[in-house]
Image (cartoon, helix red, strand yellow):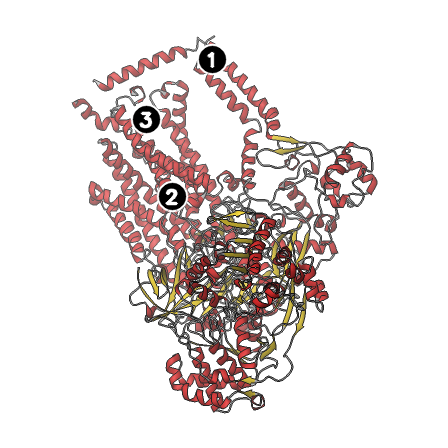
Amino acid sequence: MDAALIPEGAKRCSFPKFMLGIAIVGAVLLWGVYAMLLCWFKGLNQTNMNDYYGFALWIWADLAVIAVGGGAFFTGLLKYIFKIDELKNIINFAVIIGFICYSSALLILAIDIGQPLRGWFIFWHANVHSMLTEVAFCLSCYFAVLTIEFIPNILENRQLNKVPFFHHLAHNMHGTMAIFAATGAFLSFFHQGSLGGVAGVLYGRPFAVREGLLIWPWTFFLFTWSAAAFGPCFTLLVTRITEAVTGKKLVKDNVIHLLAKISGWMIFTYIIAKIIDTIYWANVTVPGLGYELSHFYTGNSLYGYWILVTEIIICGVIPGLLLINKSTRENPNLRLLAIILGVIGVCLNRWVMVLQVMAVPVMSFDTWALYIPSWQEVATTILPVAYGIILIAVTYRYLPVFPQELELNQSKAQES
Amino acid sequence: MIQDKKAHKFGMVIDLDKCTGCGSCTVSCMAENNIPFKEDESDKKDSLTWMRVYKLTNGKPFPETQTAYLPRPCQHCGGKGDHGHSPCVSVCPATATDYGYDTGIVSQIYTRCFGCRYCMAACPYHARYFNWWDPVWPEGMEKYLSPNVSPRMRGVVEKCSFCYHRYQLAREQAYFDETDEIPEDAYQTACTTACPAGAIIFGDLNNPSHKIHQIVKPDPHPDPLNHDVVGKSRNPKVFRLLERLGTNPKVYYMSEREWVRKLGDSYLEGEWDKVKNHHGAASHD
Amino acid sequence: MKVDRRSFLGLGLGAVAGIAISPVGAKLTDDSSIWTQNWPWTPVPPDGKITYGQSVCTLCPGTCGISVRKIGGRPVKIEGQDTYPVNNGGACLHGIAGLQYLYDPCRVKTPLKKNNGRFEPISWEEAITLVAGRLGKLRKNQNPEALACITDTNLGSVPGLFSHFMAAFGSPNHVFMQTLESWLTQTAQTLHGPGHTLGFDLENADFILSFGAGIIEGWGSPVACFKANSGRRQRGGKLYQIEPRLSSTAAGADKWIPIHPGTEADLAMAMCGILLQENLFDPEFAAGFRGGLNRFNAMVQQKYPVEQVAAITGISAADIKKTAIAFAKAKMPVAVPGKGRGDGAQSLKEFAAIHTLNCLTGNINKKGGTFVKPVPEYLAFPDPVQDAVARDGAAKEKLAGSAPELVTKIHQSDAPVVDTLFVYNANPCYTLNDPIQTSAAFEKIPFVVNFTAFMDETAMASDVILPISTFLERFEDVPSKAGFAGLVVGLARPVVDPVFDTRSPGDVLIHLAKTLGGTMGESFDWPDYKTCLKSLVPGIWNDLYKKGYAVVSQGPPAGRMETNFAFLAENPPTIQPQGDADLILVPIDNMRVASTAPASSPFAIKTVSDRVIKNTDMFVEINPKTANGLKDGGFVTLTTPAGSAKVRLNFNEGIMPGVIGMVKGLGHRFDNRYVAGKGVNVHELISPVIEPGSGLDAAFGVKASISKA
Amino acid sequence: MSEIENKTEHGSMDGAKESAAEDPKNDTGLGLGVIFFILAFLICFLSGWLLFPKLLYSKHEQPFNFDHALHVQETGDCESCHFLREDGTFSGIPKTESCLDCHTDEPMGETEDEAIFAAEYVAKQREVPWYVYAKQPDCVYFSHAAHIKAAGMDCVTCHGHIGESTSSRPYEENRLTGYSRDIWGNNIWGITKNPWDSMKMDDCAVCHEEETGHKGYCFQCHK
């Protein structure tokens, strides 16, 4: 039915099967859209957020998708600037994942704000002192860059590529991609960082506040670093999932190993920095404000020291070591474990830097504030996941996303 | 920044020993500022009360228990070093809230706010409130709304304004009378005038003739122990909330009771005894 | 010509390009954001000229002067009136929320008649004719005493007009709700003879010994008391608070002395004993002691020895002695009776014992002391014109001494004792202990006429509702009361035209009497209430009208006071709480909740702690030691002899073990989603116990048990 | 070579058909496309510029015509009717009561408008529901006293020569925002020649910046 659109030589499942899958995920998507419309038309009373939890699940989801979407800029940086050519075999997919993550982030922001129709005031009446302004500008610009990076891949669709204009456009865009990759890396550095800055500048919140360099608190650098470290993990994870779903090998092992190795070193160095930051914060920053470390990890039913251990040791040090070490890195199961732990780790870090910040009492007579999201919040948070799955399915089906796909699956095709 | 010849610094001092926790300030504030109410207001984390009264306790068992009340308006922080970079103002992405260098009041434009709530995350006092709901009054009750304060729409953040509209009214009177002076009693907030116990005193911290200045005796120099802190009270009975964070609030509290003063901030074990008699640069003279 | 894809593409692109470089996009983006700034469903209050109106708040016995800010003639804010001699600026939260009462959705908007259990609107003429018809029959049948009347108080011209009406009609059955003032009058009568009441000069006293009086929680005239308390702190005056719970007053006191609930009278008796024994009473004042001081002394020494009282009250003997001696040795000591707001169930024995402490110190009718003063007499009512029917009826024996006693009598009797009942400014079907019984008693009364502004529980149990204007819409004289030291009469004045089709109660009574005609009409020979009021207060009308108030008396009353100990010397029995469970439930007065009529405003309810009401569930306070394995915040069933309720626990270290505290004023059952349907009415768990000496309900609490729900 | 091949086959055939239509030699399609483009562009462009502003605003006539010039002639100034109250607040549009200082329910002149005023408003003791051209939204606080008294400005500076008008023009209201058109200004891009051509926040800010060196803080102009 849609054979004409499928990349030449690639094998795809039947159209009805494909549509069935899309329909199932689409139903989830529609559920999310329904929740989104409720939030837009009835207001944020549809959520379980409150005056203590002005930032909650959505902002966490925002930070998390941007962190794991960091694979796009970092892989681009490595490929186009550091000229690590093997990565061309995964860069397309990294860009798509990045595109999904960033478009999701923008969508979530559009739901999250109380007055979506006035959202553009952030640009029009921008306050340059606000980290969020920096986030908004860099995020939108980088999203534009990602779109530009994504376009050549779209134009490589068999039908589109037949149009000479599109064909040449795609070709030329590939040629200039280094410029965009550099721009993207620059923008990403700032918005990943400013997302870290969002928490780090809150000097009214001892749990979040960090000292830093010039106007940037340490969390600024930690966030950029962690996005670069864990973003590739997520790219690898999604690649692995796509391989599992399609039942095909899509990227050669040497590429995977290389990216995993780079990620491993990034995680390892990041986690050392994070440990230093935590120790400094716990021993200097916080006592200086009159708080014991235990204040932040006791006296409530959720946030205990376990979260610190999980984030730093289990989901930081361990994946780092597993990916640095050649034998564990090249063991598919251990590698998978490491990248899963890594993704959990960075998401947990973003959770802590949003939700735990809100939960900790600051005034001595205040109490811990815990919160459970409403179904509307959960649905709108799952919405981007469903959207991502659909977009990956569609792009995989119709675009030559994985340059090595045909090569890796030739024998199979011949066998049949 | 307006370099006013005579910049004001409006502030408040609340005597916690006089405060009875009666709630008049809260209600006066709600009536003055067109604050709506809902069917269920028992979820205090979703209840618009610019002026909230907290209950403090010394945590001791019966019969040693002691309690006190602490009314908490917006603290109108001057920010670190009192430079006007209040925690909430510096983070607003749309410049919908700013620090008035001529009054020391943190002001807002509700109609510019697009509801990102970053300011709420920044405020450790929970002084900022979000309009989760459309403001709705029972039929006919909207007749008592005051035109001096615009009712806020759903989806924006609001907070105590130190009844800025009363300042505006006082200024209009002064313009009409062709004088520069606004007498102390011409500009008083709704909570101050309502307080039946006379526990709230409001005025210009920069004006030595004002009662608040005489009670608080703000230290113009940075605190030698923490240079972010400016305007520490030289009155041993007066303290501020979370002073150590360097937010530099303009709302001061006063109590004879040491346990009450201690609750103003967090202290490591043994630390309180060292700092409790430290009252700004003056105590080093 | 072939229209193909390209044509459509051209059309689309052209349209997009054309719109894009026109102002449509930019303007609509901007305008849609401006639309969000001016949503048509967000109200825009109209502007206008600022003016001020002055009136007196009648929501509670506090009688504060208020200033109403109006904009374009529309009242927008109520504040305390700076110059008013009761509150001197400042106002309580209920008064400040007064405009919510004015526009309350459960205001009665027009006269109503009950027909088959449902109210239907009728005109004022119909309503008056209906009531007059019923009343006319009573008089025709020579049975005028079958008309009874409950008003909140007996003070002021409006309750006075009701009394006048009852007298002219020929019924002795005008009873009043229990108020602090009624207890104080009874106490003064018992110890000093009829025609007296008590006032407390808290503003100047240097040692206040409060037996549970919520001095900063609504006792007496709340704002005046708040000011006095702040003044006391500045003066360095002392406050000792004796009560089972760490109330705000206790927390703000110099000393909190926890006491077993209901044993205050014993303590006061023991303290009297100490004062007498240690010769710490004032010999000069003692010259005026009558009626068996010695007998009293002998009795207290025998019946209230300190050690025994220490065991009963839970206060150590040493503390009792120390406190009594400190009190006696103070320069200006005042012992203050009246637990909580002082308007709930209390005991005359307790009031008398506490006031005896004042008498013994001799700090009576002196600055900073207790004032034994005449009941207000500023109203010059003409004698009612009575015909034979009225004279006969009025001479009959009074059914009851108080509203709770009347209700109990009606409830207990099989024969209809009352044919028609007037209720004015009271909500007995909510406020009295055992309101279910009260409502049942109301069912037994064939014809209940309610003069009320709000559709409350009692209004719902009435047959005809005559909607009255609020204190912001009408004239009324408002005398200070409830322990206020001096006598200030204020004038409530209309600051706004009646919002609904309501009338002043005085005008309604005049209209009703004229409709009845004959001697009734002659007794009410005024054209309207305002003229009537003017004629009733000839001496102070000018002050009232010009200044808004008249100070009738201030400072200590002149003259020596005689004190009669006969009542106490008999050692009247102490009222014990009903039931035999282990715990004791006591109502708590919370300043933020109105416990009598009218109910709280939405604003007031909004300020109530989430440890009192959460959603619609109510918390009761207990000491963690009493919990017995139950959890803080957990649901329990609270059971008393009168009933049971599902409530949640609020652990409070500041309440005596064994005591359960429950806030008064919640659990309303009328139709107002902002105020009613939240929590439980504590009165539903307590049955009235009429104290023999006073005829008033003295059930201060009840035995109770809790179990996991 | 089976499935994939076949599909590719089909695919290319589809492609071939389409490319025939797109054959550059057959340029009627393209030409028509261009014509449609131009047509649509012009229609949308012109309606965006000319029709849209008309649709965006609804027009209302004032309850009756008001002759400012005549009244200024009779009273001598603006302040007789538009005055500062003793508390410094601004009276705005006069209430009927103020008009009664001169007018009665018997018309003084002979205009039809005054007759309407006398009969409909004075006699019936009603307020005239004037449309206010310079009405700011509810979020705006504006102090006339600050501008008249402290800054010594006159009415014309902001309001223009309304005092010289002899008739009331229709009031135009933005259908979406409810604003008077005078706030944004007649020009749809907000371009203005005179201060009174528009009364937006930016217009206030420009002058404030010039006169006081600062735009002012939020609450200076917002409530």
Q: Where is residue C531 in the image (x, y as percent from the top left)?
A: 70, 60
Q: Can residue C427 be seen in this view?
A: yes
> What residue would you read off at disc 3?
A399
Q: Do badges 3 and 2 share one subunit?
A: yes
- Res. A377 mark: 2
* Residue sitting nearer the eye, D148 or C634: C634
In the depicted structure, whether residue C150 falls above or below residue C239: above
Q: Where is residue A271 in the image (x, y as percent from the top left)?
A: 32, 51
Label 1 to label 2, Cα distance in Å? Answer: 49 Å
Label 1 to label 3, Cα distance in Å? Answer: 29 Å
Q: In which quarter of the image is the N terminus of chain D?
A: top left
* Residue sitting nearer the eye, C167 or C678: C167
Residues marked 3 and 2 touching at CB (< 8 Å): no
Q: Position of residue B52 (x, y in %)?
A: 50, 59
Give the SS element for disc 2. helix
Residue C201 vs residue A119: left or right? right
Disc 2 marks a residue whose amino acid type is Glu
> What residue would you read off at disc 1?
D30
Mark 2, Cα crowd under 10 Å, few <14 / some 14-19 / many 20+, is many
The disc, 3 or 2, on the residue closer to the chain's N-terminal end is 2
In the depicted structure, whether residue A277 falls above or below residue C571: above
